[in-house]
Image (cartoon, rainbow, N blue to C red):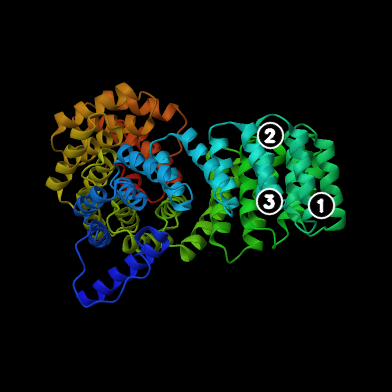
Amino acid sequence: MKKFLLIKYILITAIYLLAAGPLWAQKKGKKKTDQPLPQTPQYETEYWFIEAEKQYLLKNYAKAIELFNKCLVDDPQNDAVFFKLADIYNRTEQYNTAARYIDMAIRLNKQNKYYYLLAVDIYTNLGELNRVAALYEQLLDKIPGTEEYLFNLAAVYLYLKDYDKALATYDRAEETMGLTEQIAYQRQKIYLELNQPDKAVEESRKLIARYPDNYDYVLQLAEILSTNKRQSEAARVLQQLLAEHPEVSAARLQLADIYWQDNQIDRFREELITAFQDSTLHINAKINTLMRYMTYLPNATLQKLIPQLADMVAAKHPDNSNAYLIQGDVYSAFIEKELLPPDKIDDAKRAARQAYATYVRMQPDNFSVWQNLLNLELQLNMNDSLQLHADQALELFPNQPWLYLIDGIAQLQEGNYRQAAQLLEAGRKRAANNRKLLIMFYSYLGDIYHELKEYEKSDRAYEAALDLDPFNYTVLNNYSYYLSLRGEKLDKAAKMSTELVRNNPDNNTFLDTYAWVQYTLGNYEEARRVFEKIIASGVTEGVYYDHYGDTLYQLGLVDEAVEQWKKARELDQNLENIDQKIAQRKIIQ
């Protein structure tokens, strides 16, 4: 290996010395001899240079600098050594020192292209772009065959906003290389920046004449015209293109935008639908168009058209996952922005859910889409799909606590309390730094452990939730209600339920909890007062009438109690013991 490296160093150094020209050339006519060479300064310089080059290749820059400086002792006008030192200081980010050395190299040798290019890099790092421009000018002036660097020079002038010099540089490039797309495009950008749209239009027309089969230049021309309030001209350009080449659907998108601005809604709709029906039109163009017109919502025309277009994207690009992503996002946005009539909301949720389900089959690594999918399935009560997808998502993202919450809720809804508890406990441990999520975990765990009759765990979970959020009304409600059912810690239940109704005086669920706690405490008149308020609000849930009936029974009003129980049964035949209560005219425990 060492032998290979040595050969490599010798070859590289030999090549470098050849590139450096006559710098190291021996005098001609020197006779061959077996005697050792005299230790002349030139020989020593060559030796130190080769050794320095070895250290440079090994990236032992400190040693390389030491050896290159030894070269300068005997040969202080050696431009190659100054170049190498500048390169090392540039690589080690000592830019000011690098600049001094490269300036010396160029002063000694103005005919080496690589000296200028290194100088450009160094002064760019120093942020001295005027110096960079001067170096490019010097390079182009001194060394033939470097016209390619005209584009670099023009780019520097553009950055410096010296537009006149940039234009002059692109003109020089055109004289040397002929008109190219890059030259015309860059000049066009400058003219637009200078608010000279006529000259920008002229550049587009040059490109169209030079490249008649490239329709992008026609589209570019129309875009410039339209942007500069010359819509009628832009429309004519696009209409002519479509008359000759109706397959260029990108032109229809631009034409549709002109019709939109001119309030020609029928023509706008027609062009968009025709374009979106073209499966050869790139999907990104369609997605960008949808996103553009989404910004104009709410709008009656777009509220009908955009979902239709989103469906067309999915239909015309069935193998592209982004087609389903934009379809799901469109329907989700319409739901969020409340742009749909009430009877269409569930249909939109189902459409979004189906789109996201298709997307995750194709691209399962996008967590945010899994979130959207699971949220929709939760809202649609699609518990079978919810469990399936939650399990799949957990396999992919085992450290996402939110997924444990959703999977736990799905198990809870199926009555699988033990599995739900296990999932929620696992998720809780992963949500240590997420306060809002922790509250939800503890809240559900309180409910689940109550169902499992593990009351101590249930209470601890509720208490943990309240430690994080003392005014969490869901927790206050469930905790106090379950305590009343158990007949335990009733003073605490009363305090929590009182807090509930003080802050939510019109919430029937919370009023019912408060009234039931009062009932459990034996405060039947107070319970009756609150139940009558609930009933007066026009509720249709049987449980309220059932509780009201129990309260009336405790007050000795049996006939009135039976009447309320009958109303409760009419509304909900699944209430516990409701038939026995009515038949036996008493509370059945």
Q: Residue at x 57, y 63 (%)?
A: 320
The 10 Å Cα crowd at callout 1, few under 14, some 14 to 19, many 20 or more, is few
Label 3 or label 2, whichever lies nearer to me, is 3
Q: Is residue 293 left or right of residue 431?
A: right
Whichever of callouts 3 and 2 sits on the residue coming sooner in the sequence is 3
Q: Is residue 131 left or right of residue 93?
A: right
Give the amino acid type for the residue marked by disc 1 in the picture.
Ala
In three-dimensional space, the C-alpha distance between marks 1 and 2, rounded to whole angstroms, equals 20 Å
Q: Residue at x 82, y 44 (%)?
A: 267
The answer to whether residue 116 is seen in the rendering is yes
Q: Identify the disc placed on residue 176.
A: 3
Q: Give the residue at mark 2.
A: 192
> Which element is circle 2 on?
helix
Q: Give the residue at mark 1.
A: 209
> Which element is circle 1 on?
helix
- Quadrant placement of the N terminus: bottom left
Q: Identify the disc placed on residue 242.
A: none
Rendered position, 384 above or below 205: below
Whichever of callouts 1 and 2 sits on the residue coming sooner in the sequence is 2
The 10 Å Cα crowd at callout 3, few under 14, some 14 to 19, many 20 or more, is few
Give the amino acid type for the residue marked by disc 3 in the picture.
Thr
Q: Is residue 481 left or right of residue 358?
A: left
Q: Residue at x 80, y 56 (%)?
A: 212
The 10 Å Cα crowd at callout 2, few under 14, some 14 to 19, many 20 or more, is some
Give the amino acid type for the residue marked by disc 2 in the picture.
Leu
